Image (spheres, rainbow, N blue to C red):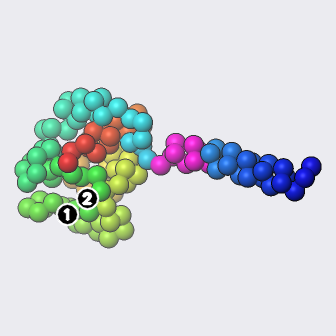
Amino acid sequence: MTASSAKTGRVAGRAAAAAVLCLALGAGLGPARAADAAAGKALFDRTCTNCHSTQIGINKVGPSLFDVVGRPVASVQGYDYSPKLREMAKRWKVWDPAHLDTYLTNPRQVLHGVRMYFAVPDATDRANLISYLGTLK
């Protein structure tokens, strides 16, 4: 084997390893990846609209979820967040897909003292819901 072919083999091997790593990481980059936003909207319409609005500035029992993905935690003006969620905002900073996934699994178990009682225990439902929430811009 020549030095050139050895180098080519190492580069090809690294490229293949990088591709596998990207695929593996891509699968875990967030629950909203490859999810069904339409199914998420249907779930939202069935279960979330009683307490949450998707319109900017309209709070209900819960805060507006307009532009929630990427928004700072506990930041909607005019909404009185629980002390526990305001405290969590210091650690989580923003509602990214991973934090939304954790929270929606069981809000009261994750953060004792929050007001939200509805949980989304199914991972596919959560991924679809988070995908839909990501469209609210």
The relative height of residue 22 versus residue 93 in the rendered view (above or below) is above
Specify few, some or many for label 1: CA neighbours under 10 Å numbering under 14, 14-19, or 20 or more. Answer: some
- Give the image location of residue 38, x and y in percent: 27, 30
- The label shown at residue 4 is none
Residue 68 or residue 21, whichever sits in front: 21
Residue displayed at 15% across by 44% down: 54
Specify few, some or many for label 2: CA neighbours under 10 Å numbering under 14, 14-19, or 20 or more. Answer: some
| Numbered disc total | 2
Which residues are the magenta region?
21-29
Q: Main secondary structure of the magenta part?
A: helix
What type is the residue that disc 1 sits on? Ser
The relative height of residue 42 versus residue 117 in the rendered view (above or below) is above
Question: Is residue 109 visible in the rendered structure shown here?
Answer: no
Residue displayed at 87% across by 56% down: 3
Residue 98 or residue 80, whichever sits in front: 98
Residue displayed at 43% across by 47% down: 30
- For the residues labelled 2 and 1, the Cα–Cα distance comes to 8 Å
- Give the image location of residue 98, x and y in percent: 40, 52
What type is the residue that disc 2 sits on? Arg
Question: Is residue 78 visible in the rendered structure shown here?
Answer: yes
User: Is residue 98 a member of the stretch shown in magenta?
Assistant: no
The relative height of residue 124 versus residue 77 in the rendered view (above or below) is above
- Residue at numbered disc 1: 75
> Which SS class for mark 1?
loop
- The label shown at residue 71 is 2
Which quarter of the figure has residue 71?
bottom left
- Give the image location of residue 115, x and y in percent: 21, 53
